[in-house]
């Protein structure tokens, strides 16, 4: 018989927060079934499964509601784990549904980040036999952690605010609560389950139990970086106050001139930064970076007559840059898992390993064009929230990214890449710079590759995906 209080549940968590252990303990209760990561964009349920409750990954991709209905209709009380980068369409369905129970699992974000880095290094994501434990030391990267934390904050705030607006509440569980059988029984009671347990699941073992100083090679540097940040309280849940905009740490100020560049992720950032450095006769490494809201406000107050600007790129070049840098390429900053998912689900045929079209005989320009066209078609659906893959800032519409900037402050000037040399000279003059240097001649290092494949089909596909940007910024055809 279906439980009366809720139709199904969602366990909101992140990697390395103890979600596997919590799932195992939920499954100990008679009539309760947690079905893994049912809406992970790269697999369904578990990496070695083909379906959840008879729904396959392609069927789920086409209609996520069908899988939710299957979860609701299955005997007993069923649910699934959901992370911030899972199918965003599910949030629109589950968060506003009072018949869906929300369980929110949190962990100190520094602990979960280091645990994730070690698991990535060792390849060990679960441990059932302590004799097989793999250990490792990792290097803490403050910039990478900032990005990790921003994703956690955004996800937690969305959950919190949606529940507030719809008059709901969630059951919050901290990582440290997972070893308390009474809390697990309390969770079951809250779910409307009459069954109780007397002991926890003992199969899964805690990984990396040593102190943080033994897990991080540059522990002192990590401590100093976290102390300087002072933007969060690591023990506070669920929303990791204070809330902050995600783009400010990427903004760049000139070393001496009153110029502030507000870059968009797939724009001509390197060329603009070189121009700013040349303006002051310094190296790009001497530009001012990694602003917080507080330090940026200080800079704005201390820099009268400043000029804030951003640069928008033609949507064809914008999408091509994101495609080449995030999907075709390999290494830091690229999305290998998304690349594989795009190949399996969206027919974006890019070899898994970072080919270069100009030199890789197995992936020539014809193959590059076909894959880019498929990527543009994927973008049309992704930008319309019709795919399970996250909408990344690397390919989000530029008009939407500018709206996000407005939470802190809009640029004084929005410049098109096509008129960069003229417009940056005007901005420099506005800031009191009489003889600004020229902009580097090549602002898009991928322009040659794009010119070799561009045609009307690519233009039409880009307009289908980015119609709003064409309209907002007055772009014509790329060529």
Image (cartoon, rainbow, N blue to C red):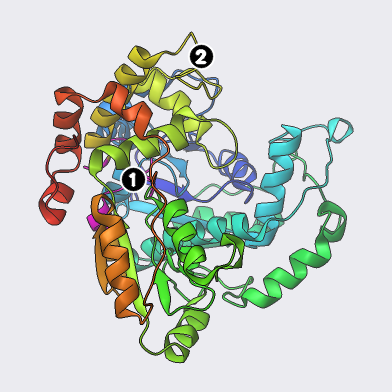
Which residue extends farthest top? 362
Choose mark 1 or mark 2, whichever is in front. Answer: 2
Quarter holding residue 159: bottom left
Q: Quadrant of the N terminus?
A: top left
Read off the magenta span.
383-401
Residue 185 falls left or right of residue 140: left
Left or right placement of residue 13 versus residue 127 in this view: left
| Left-right relation of 390 to 212 | left
What residue sits 51% from the left and 16% below the top? 359
Instruction: List x then y, in percent, for residue 213.
Output: 85, 60
| Contact flag, marks 1 and 2 (Cβ < 8 Å) | no
Give the residue number, with chain letter if any, for mark 1. Answer: 88
Circle 2 sits on which residue?
360
Position of 339 with respect to 18 (left or right) is left
Image position of 55 with respect to 201: above or below: above
Instruction: Compare residues 67 and 407 and report the one nearer the observer.
Output: 407
Q: Residues within 10 Å of mark 1 (few under 14, many from 20)?
A: many
- Secondary structure beneath disc 1? helix
**Residue drawn where x is 73% and y is 55% of the image:** 140
Q: Quadrant of residue 311?
A: bottom left
């Amino acid at each position: 018989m279906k439980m009366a209080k809720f139709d199904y549940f969602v366990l909101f968590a992140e990697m390395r927060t103890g979600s596997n252990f919590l799932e195992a303990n939920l499954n100990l209760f008679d009539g309760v079934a947690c079905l893994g990561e049912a809406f992970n964009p790269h697999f369904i349920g578990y990496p070695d499964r083909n379906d959840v409750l008879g729904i396959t990954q392609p069927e789920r991709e086409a209609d996520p509601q069908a899988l939710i209905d299957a979860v609701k209709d299955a005997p007993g009380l069923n649910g699934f784990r959901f992370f911030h980068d899972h199918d965003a369409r599910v949030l629109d369905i589950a968060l506003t549904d009072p018949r869906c129970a929300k369980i929110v699992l949190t962990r100190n974000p520094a602990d979960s980040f280091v645990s994730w880095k070690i698991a990535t290094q060792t390849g060990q994501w679960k441990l059932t036999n302590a004799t097989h434990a793999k250990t490792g030391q990792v290097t803490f990267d403050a910039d990478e952690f900032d990005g990790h934390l921003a994703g956690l904050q955004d996800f937690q705030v969305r959950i919190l605010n949606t529940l507030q607006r719809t008059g709901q509440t969630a059951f919050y569980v901290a990582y440290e609560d997972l070893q308390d059988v009474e809390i697990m029984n309390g969770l079951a009671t809250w779910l409307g389950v009459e069954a109780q347990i007397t002991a926890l699941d003992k199969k899964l073992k805690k990984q990396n139990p040593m102190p943080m100083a033994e897990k991080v090679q540059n522990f002192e540097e990590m401590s100093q970086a976290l102390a300087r940040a002072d933007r969060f309280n690591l023990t506070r849940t669920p929303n990791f106050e204070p809330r902050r905009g995600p783009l400010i740490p990427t903004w760049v100020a000139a070393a001496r001139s009153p110029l502030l560049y507000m870059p968009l992720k797939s724009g001509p950032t390197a060329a603009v930064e070189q121009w700013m450095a040349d303006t002051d006769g310094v190296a790009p490494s001497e530009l001012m970076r990694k602003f917080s809201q507080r330090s940026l406000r200080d800079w704005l107050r201390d820099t009268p007559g400043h000029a804030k600007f951003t640069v928008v790129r033609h949507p064809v070049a914008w999408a091509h840059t994101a495609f080449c840098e995030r999907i075709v390429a390999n290494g830091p900053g690229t999305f290998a898992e998304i690349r594989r998912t795009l190949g399996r689900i969206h027919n974006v045929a890019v070899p898994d390993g970072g080919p270069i079209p100009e030199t890789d005989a197995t992936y020539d320009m014809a193959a590059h064009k076909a894959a880019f066209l498929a990527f543009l078609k994927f973008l049309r659906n992704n930008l319309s929230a019709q795919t399970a893959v996250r909408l990344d800032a690397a390919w989000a519409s530029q008009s939407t990214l500018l709206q996000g900037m407005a939470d802190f402050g809009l640029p004084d000037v929005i410049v098109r890449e096509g008129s960069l040399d003229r417009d940056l000279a005007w901005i420099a003059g506005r800031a009191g710079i009489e003889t600004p240097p020229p902009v580097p001649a090549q602002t898009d290092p991928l322009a040659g590759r794009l010119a070799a494949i561009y045609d009307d089909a690519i233009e039409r596909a880009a307009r289908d995906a980015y119609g709003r940007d064409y309209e907002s910024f007055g772009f014509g055809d790329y060529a």
